[in-house]
Amino acid sequence: MPSVYQLKSRFQDLLRPLCRSLAAAGITANQVTLAALGLSVLEGLALWLFAGAFLPLLLLPVVLFIRMGLNAIDGMLAREHDQKSDLGAVLNELGDVLSDAALYLPFALLPFVSGTLVVGLVVLAVIGEMTGVIGVQIGASRRYDGPFGKSDRAVLFGLCGLLMAFGLTSPLAYQILFGAGLALAALTILNRARAAIEKKRSA
């Protein structure tokens, strides 16, 4: 199914010159991974401490875009500059789910947003990433199947942050948006589980 993840290769091509420069400067994949996590936690704290404030909400799409770029760069550093490591794999997977939680859970504090939907979305996001990793455990491959992976979640929450920053506080609008996200997150879990099993069977 369609997903923002399908644009990843083009995004990486744009970032490759910067990636080469970082590698030449001695920057490691793990340092980039930790930088992405640190940035996410700082933005999450701002969203939590200043719930509903204009600037943190306006900055959210920017932070999410930078995080996406850092996530792409750490992968390229690992693969293309011989920086793969067990620690890197652990940091990469944990960093993604911790960043999601830090950035998205503060939305549950807003009075016009259903906290249940937001928490449910974050929980399903964690399960979805875990399902992707299970593909490796059963001898298939790490699954990134959509329709609602990490990049798609970033688009949804970035859009919501932008709408909120400019005054859209309709509870119905966010019930629809986050409700749709919840359904797509559940479908993503099913798709990743099915794809991993099919991949294993065809191997």
Image (cartoon, rainbow, N blue to C red):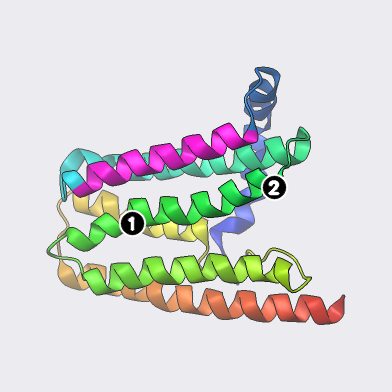
User: Which segment is the magenta one?
Assistant: 29-48
Query: Percent x, y for residue 174?
Result: 24, 68
Of callouts 1 and 2, which one flags the residue occurring earlier in the amino acid sequence? 2
Q: Does residue 116 appear to the left or right of 198 in the view shown?
A: left
The residue indicated by pointer 1 is 104
Q: Give the secondary structure at mark 1.
A: helix
Residue sitting at 34 percent across and 51 percent down? 103
Q: CA distance from mark 1 to mark 2?
A: 28 Å
Query: Percent x, y for residue 181?
Result: 39, 71
Q: Quadrant of residue 38?
A: top left
- Note whether 168 is above or below 201 in the view shown: above
Residue sitting at 46 percent across and 73 percent down? 185
Q: Which mark is residue 10?
A: none
Q: Nearer the viewer, residue 169 or 142?
A: 142
Quarter of the rendering occupied by the C terminus: bottom right
Residue sitting at 67 percent across and 26 percent down? 17
Looking at the image, the residue that sits furthest to the right is 203
The residue indicated by pointer 2 is 86
Looking at the image, the residue that sits furthest to the left is 111
- Please tell me how crowded label 2 is: few (under 14), some (14-19), or many (20+) other residues with Cα within 10 Å: few
